[in-house]
């Protein structure tokens, strides 16, 4: 059953801090998060309406501040930030505006690597790394060089038909080799172990990788296949081997990046807003600002949600400045509810 779509309104539309206050300037720093999305709910967010008031907001228009020695330097943290948490990959939650995905998949990526007792085939219209028979096998990717140093924080890899593959079918390990600009292996000279002797039913996510200044990387998959899978088609190789197990469809790395929703000044903020108004009278300080920030996000319930680890979909507002007397934020969204 589908229930009518409504616009979010009233007190429920406002961000509230942990104490339940609508005025987010009552404590510094202040953190306000949208409520957890329930099963069957979907929130289509299109923006946030802000109201700021202070004794004088003019100093906040620029991103510079006094370092205490008479020098103007850029603020070391944003005045306020907007974070959007989404399930960007199955079971992996992150801010899509603060993340860049590195994807390794497809025939071109797989074929550039080296194979031992495995190969790549098109299964269900997806290039898939597949073992040849039942035995130990391995695959090592090409080394992928980047144009500049990056950081890597999370990883996800896709095993085809993982839900239907019995845990006893095979065991596998997956390693990430990360190199700096001088081709030295990072992580203390050892690869990052993404998976260690796992079965296909176990989680396929690695968080807190925490690699810095990565200039190139390489993957290595090793697997011990115990028995073949059941396939409707017959594939004959030069050696007349049987097809073993589909092992890997793709690997994805998450790179943290700067987001345009970290605002170090009011000028940066109003530049991103679709409309705004500055309230100032001649000869008097600017005390009030109203603005509408365009923000596109669809928040839904996930079966992989774990609120204890902040693994769910939400929008969060953080205010770090103490120069506001009043700060309110009202979300613009449409709420859809479907009951099974």
Image: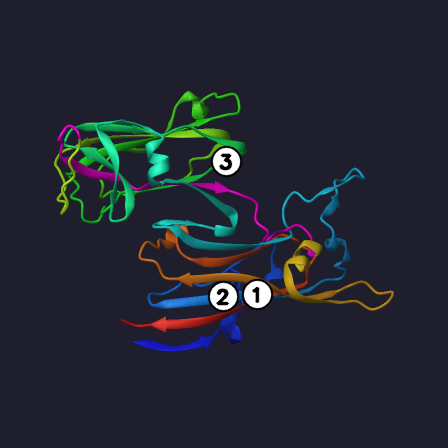
Left or right of 198 on screen, residue 104:
right
Q: Is residue 171 left or right of residue 324?
A: left
Q: Nearer the viewer, residue 105 or 236?
A: 236
Q: For label 2, count other residues whose C-alpha is less than 10 Å away and answer few (under 14), some (14-19) or many (20+).
A: many
User: x and y percent of residue 77 in the render?
Assistant: 63, 46
Residue drawn at x 55%, y 61% is 295
Query: Of the numbered discs in the image, which one, if any, rests on residue 45?
Result: 2
Give the labeled residue for mark 3. Answer: 151
Q: Residue furthest front?
A: 238
In the rendering, which numbered label is found on residue 48? Answer: 1
Return the x and y of residue 157 as percentages of the image width and height.
33, 41
Does 184 appear in magenta? no
Labels in figure, total: 3
Name the disc covering residue 158, or none.
none
User: Is 47 drawn above or below residue 176 in the view shown?
Assistant: below
Span highlighted in magenta in the image? 238-266
> Would you say 12 lies left or right of 226 here?
right
């Amino acid at each position: 059953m589908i229930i009518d779509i409504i616009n979010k309104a009233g007190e429920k539309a406002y961000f509230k801090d942990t104490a339940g206050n609508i005025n987010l300037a009552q404590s510094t720093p202040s953190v306000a998060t949208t409520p957890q999305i329930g099963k069957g709910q979907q929130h289509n967010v299109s923006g946030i309406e802000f109201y700021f008031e202070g004794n004088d907001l003019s100093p906040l228009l620029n991103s510079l501040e006094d370092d205490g020695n008479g020098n103007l330097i850029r603020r070391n943290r944003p005045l306020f930030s907007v974070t959007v948490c989404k399930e960007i990959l199955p079971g992996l939650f992150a801010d899509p505006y603060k993340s860049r995905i590195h994807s390794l998949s497809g025939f071109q990526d797989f074929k550039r690597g080296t194979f031992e007792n495995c190969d790549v085939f098109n299964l269900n219209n997806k290039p898939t790394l597949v073992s040849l028979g039942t035995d130990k096998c391995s695959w090592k990717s090409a080394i992928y060089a980047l144009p500049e140093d990056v950081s890597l924080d999370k990883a996800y890899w896709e095993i085809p038909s993982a839900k239907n593959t019995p845990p006893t079918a095979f065991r596998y390990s997956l390693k990430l080799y990360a190199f700096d600009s001088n081709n030295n292996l990072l992580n203390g000279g050892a690869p990052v172990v993404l998976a260690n002797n796992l079965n296909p039913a176990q989680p396929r996510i690695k968080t807190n990788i925490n690699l810095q200044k990565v200039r190139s990387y390489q993957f290595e998959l090793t697997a011990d296949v115990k028995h073949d899978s059941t396939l409707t088609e017959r594939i004959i190789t030069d050696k007349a081997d049987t097809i073993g197990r589909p092992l890997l469809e793709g690997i994805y790395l998450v790179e943290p990046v700067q987001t345009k929703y970290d605002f170090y000044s009011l000028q940066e903020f109003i530049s991103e807003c679709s409309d705004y108004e500055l309230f100032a009278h001649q000869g008097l300080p600017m005390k009030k600002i109203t603005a509408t920030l365009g923000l596109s996000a669809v928040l839904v319930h996930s079966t992989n949600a774990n609120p204890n680890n902040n693994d769910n979909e939400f929008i969060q507002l953080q205010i770090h400045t103490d120069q506001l007397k009043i700060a309110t934020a009202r979300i613009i969204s449409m709420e859809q509810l479907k009951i099974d």
